Image (cartoon, rainbow, N blue to C red):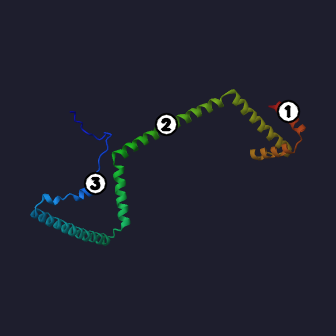
């Protein structure tokens, strides 16, 4: 015959023990009256000891609270101290130190990447500023500003700040007709 050892993963259901059957079993049949009395006596002593220890603990906790009150240690102060102690313990933990170092390294690498990016952009702007098309644009802007200043000086007989010249030129161009604008702009383009 083959005997099979039943394990945890076997599909056969585990039979539950009926609670009534357990209570029907009389464990006292195996104990003598003398042993039973001795166990009951020990149980009573243990219950008395537990009760006494609870009373002593309550008394000690009360005394502890009174001493704290005399020292001025309130629950809020105690909470702050516990929090500060826990915060310190956390900061000195290996996991916190490793995480802090990792974040610091990541921050340094990110900063270096942004610096490199900024340098590359600055170089591109420098290259662009030195390009012929940008110089041509810059010359056109300078020529336009010069023409606006000359128009302002010619019409009012005096100078002024760039903002005033620009403002009056914008005001003047808004009042002029399109045909006048065409002839003036062609005159300005010819001088530049």
CB-based contact (under 8 Å), mark 1 and mark 2: no
The C terminus, quarter of image: top right
- Nearest-to-viewer mark from 1 and 2: 2
Residue underneath mark 1: 186
CB-based contact (under 8 Å), mark 3 and mark 2: no
Label of residue 155 in the image = none
- Graded by Cα atoms within 10 Å as few (under 14), some (14 to 19) or many (20 or more), the crowding at tag 1 reads few
Q: Position of residue 87 (x, y in %)?
A: 37, 54
The N terminus, quarter of image: top left
Distance from label 1 to label 2 (Cα)?
51 Å
Q: Earlier in the sequence, mark 1 or mark 2?
A: 2
Q: Position of residue 179 (x, y in %)?
A: 90, 37
Say which of 105 and 157 sits in front. Answer: 105
Q: Position of residue 44 (x, y in %)?
A: 17, 67
Q: Is residue 131 left or right of residue 190?
A: left
- Nearest-to-viewer mark from 3 and 1: 3
Q: Report the residue that reaches farthest toward the top.
A: 132
Residue underneath mark 2: 112
Q: Earlier in the sequence, mark 3 or mark 2?
A: 3
Residue underneath mark 3: 18
Q: Secondary structure at mark 2?
A: helix
Say which of 172 and 35 sits in front. Answer: 35
Q: Secondary structure at mark 1?
A: helix
- Nearest-to-viewer mark from 3 and 2: 3
CB-based contact (under 8 Å), mark 3 and mark 1: no
Distance from label 3 to label 1 (Cα)?
110 Å
Distance from label 3 to label 2 (Cα)?
73 Å
Q: Is residue 41 left or right of residue 190?
A: left
Q: Is residue 44 left or right of residue 95?
A: left
Query: Image point 51% across, 35% down: which residue?
Result: 113
Q: Secondary structure at mark 3?
A: loop
């Amino acid at each position: 015959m083959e005997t099979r050892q039943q394990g945890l993963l076997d599909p056969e259901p585990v039979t539950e023990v009926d609670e009534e059957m357990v209570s029907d079993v009389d464990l006292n049949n195996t104990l003598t009256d003398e042993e039973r009395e001795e166990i009951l006596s020990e149980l009573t002593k243990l219950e008395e000891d537990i009760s006494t220890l609870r009373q002593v603990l309550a008394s000690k906790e009360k005394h502890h609270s009174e001493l704290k009150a005399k020292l001025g240690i309130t629950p809020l102060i105690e909470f702050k101290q516990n929090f500060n102690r826990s915060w310190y313990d956390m900061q000195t933990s290996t996991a916190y130190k490793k995480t802090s170092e990792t974040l610091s390294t990541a921050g340094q690498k990110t900063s270096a990447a942004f610096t490199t990016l900024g340098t590359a952009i600055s170089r591109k702007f420098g290259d662009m500023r030195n390009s012929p098309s940008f110089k041509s644009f810059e010359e056109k802007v300078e020529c336009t500003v010069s023409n606006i200043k000359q128009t302002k000086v010619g019409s009012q007989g005096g100078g002024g700040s760039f903002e005033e010249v620009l403002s009056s030129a914008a005001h003047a161009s808004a009042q002029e007709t399109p045909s006048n604008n065409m002839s003036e702009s062609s005159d300005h383009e010819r001088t530049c």
